[in-house]
Image (tube, rainbow, N blue to C red):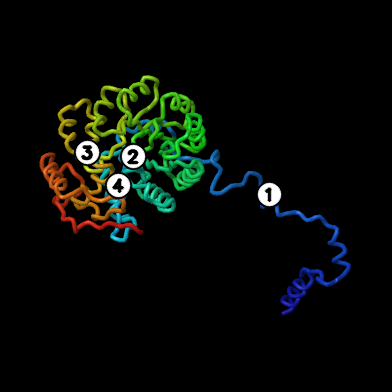
């Protein structure tokens, strides 16, 4: 008991004594004191989520340069238009099992243009979390707004993506000097692939812009859609290039120096596309795949791919507008193509079906 009384006395003796707020002498003493803000509020150059020059990435541009087959992965949907992550995970697993070395998340094929940035970054983070140890995750964080491209790329690297894909500003086109400044704003953040597709952006990225940007150690290479002559121009100067045209990728790889392909078709036949990129010249396999490739791109991508994957039963037949499925006659053509190439070469296990018009769900609000 004596010990307890002593401890209580100690507590009473050490209790803080706060000045009474109404005492005049205390007010006078505080009146002349200069106010100082808390130290945390004036930390210099403090910025969230991170400063671009401080990003610590898990991979290097050299790791990205070594990739031969990169799939521009499809994003599947539930009937209410939200992401179908179960189907998405199955798609990515099929790519890994069949030899794809990288995936583009939220690219044109993955319909990043129809996503909010929250959806976009979530899907990149989900892909890294589930598959980042087995495949390189390249997030499409490009934009026609430099401000948005910077912010999205910071977030993409913050959630662990291995590299960024950047397109040149579209619609509100800029000068060549503006292109250099735009890309210079994001290159310091981490490994970067620049995507040149004038048919979509309305503006070509000429070689003199790429040659300037190639001075950055973070430039992994170019996804080039202009053609194989342009590809050879870059590869002759030691710049890594991936073909962005599936119908030209065989020649690009084996006759023009391309490192590989960033492919749409590999969503459907990843094993055959890997053989096309790794197995040496194979004109017979290339000829076998060309009818499928032509079918896929008869309408703007990803219309054909979305239709095909639904017919194979690996995604639900749900389309986010403005994309709609190919017409019935074209769906019949796809069934015949699958039979000619061999069902075993395609992703999924279900029998390929034609599907009726009423089987498809078109979602405008999600």
- Identify which residue, 209 or 250, lies in the foreground: 209
Q: How many marks?
A: 4
Residue 271: assigned label:
3
Question: Would you call the spot at circle 2 few (<14 residues within 10 Å), some (14-19), or many (20 or more)?
Answer: many
Q: Going by the image, does 30 lie left or right of 307?
A: right
Q: Is residue 303 above or below residue 34?
A: above
Residue contact at pointers 3 and 4, CB within 8 angstroms: no
Q: Going by the image, does 131 lie left or right of 15?
A: left
Of callouts 2 and 4, the N-terminal one = 4
Q: Going by the image, does 226 lie left or right of 213?
A: left
Of callouts 3 and 4, the N-terminal one = 4
Please give the residue where the numbered disc 4 appears in the rendered image.
Answer: 74
CA separation in Å, label 1 and label 3: 55 Å
User: Could you say whether the residue bearing mark 3 is in a helix, strand or loop?
Assistant: helix
CA separation in Å, label 2 and label 1: 42 Å
Residue 107, quarter of picture: top left
Give the x, y percent position of residue 192.
Answer: 43, 35
Give the x, y percent position of residue 258.
Answer: 32, 26
Of callouts 1 and 3, the N-terminal one = 1
Please give the residue where the numbered disc 2 appears in the rendered image.
Answer: 102
Give the x, y percent position of residue 44.
Answer: 66, 45
Residue 138, quarter of picture: top left
- Identify which residue, 69 or 31, lies in the foreground: 31
User: Could you say whether the residue bearing mark 2 is in a helix, strand or loop?
Assistant: strand
Please give the residue where the numbered disc 1 appears in the rendered image.
Answer: 42
Of callouts 4 and 1, the N-terminal one = 1
Question: Would you call the spot at circle 1 few (<14 residues within 10 Å), some (14-19), or many (20 or more)?
Answer: few
Residue 151: assigned label:
none
């Amino acid at each position: 008991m004596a010990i307890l009384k002593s401890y209580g006395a100690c507590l009473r003796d050490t209790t803080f004594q706060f000045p009474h707020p109404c005492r005049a002498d205390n007010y006078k003493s505080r009146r002349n004191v200069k106010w100082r803000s808390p130290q945390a509020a004036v930390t210099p150059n403090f910025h969230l989520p991170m400063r671009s020059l401080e990003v610590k990435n898990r991979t290097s541009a050299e790791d990205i340069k070594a990739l031969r087959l990169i799939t521009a992965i499809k994003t599947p949907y539930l009937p209410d238009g939200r992401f179908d992550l179960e189907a998405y995970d199955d798609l990515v697993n099929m790519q890994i099992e069949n030899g794809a070395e990288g995936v583009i998340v939220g690219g044109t094929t993955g319909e990043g243009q129809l996503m909010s940035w929250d959806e976009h970054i979530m899907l990149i983070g989900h892909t890294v979390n589930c598959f980042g140890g087995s495949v390189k995750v390249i997030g499409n964080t490009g934009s026609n707004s430099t401000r948005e491209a910077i912010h999205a790329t910071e977030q993409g690297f913050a959630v662990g993506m291995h590299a960024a894909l950047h397109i040149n500003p579209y619609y509100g086109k800029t000068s060549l000097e503006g292109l250099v400044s735009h890309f210079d704003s994001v290159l310091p953040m981490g490994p970067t692939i620049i995507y040149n597709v004038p048919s979509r952006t309305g503006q070509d990225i000429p070689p003199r812009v790429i040659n300037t940007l190639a001075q950055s150690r973070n430039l992994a290479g170019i996804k080039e859609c202009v053609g194989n002559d342009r590809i050879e121009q870059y590869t002759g100067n030691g710049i890594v290039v991936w073909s962005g045209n599936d119908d030209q990728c065989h020649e690009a790889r084996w006759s023009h120096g391309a490192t590989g392909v960033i492919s749409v078709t590999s969503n459907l036949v990843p094993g055959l596309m890997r053989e096309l990129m790794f197995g040496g010249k194979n004109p017979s396999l290339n000829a076998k795949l060309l009818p499928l490739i032509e079918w896929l791109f008869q309408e703007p991508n990803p219309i054909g791919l979305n239709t095909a994957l639904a017919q194979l039963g690996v995604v639900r037949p749900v389309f986010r507008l403005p994309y709609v499925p190919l017409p019935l006659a074209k769906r019949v053509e796809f069934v015949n193509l699958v039979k000619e190439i061999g069902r075993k070469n395609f992703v999924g296990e279900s029998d390929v079906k034609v599907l009726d018009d009423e089987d498809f769900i078109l979602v405008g609000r999600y």
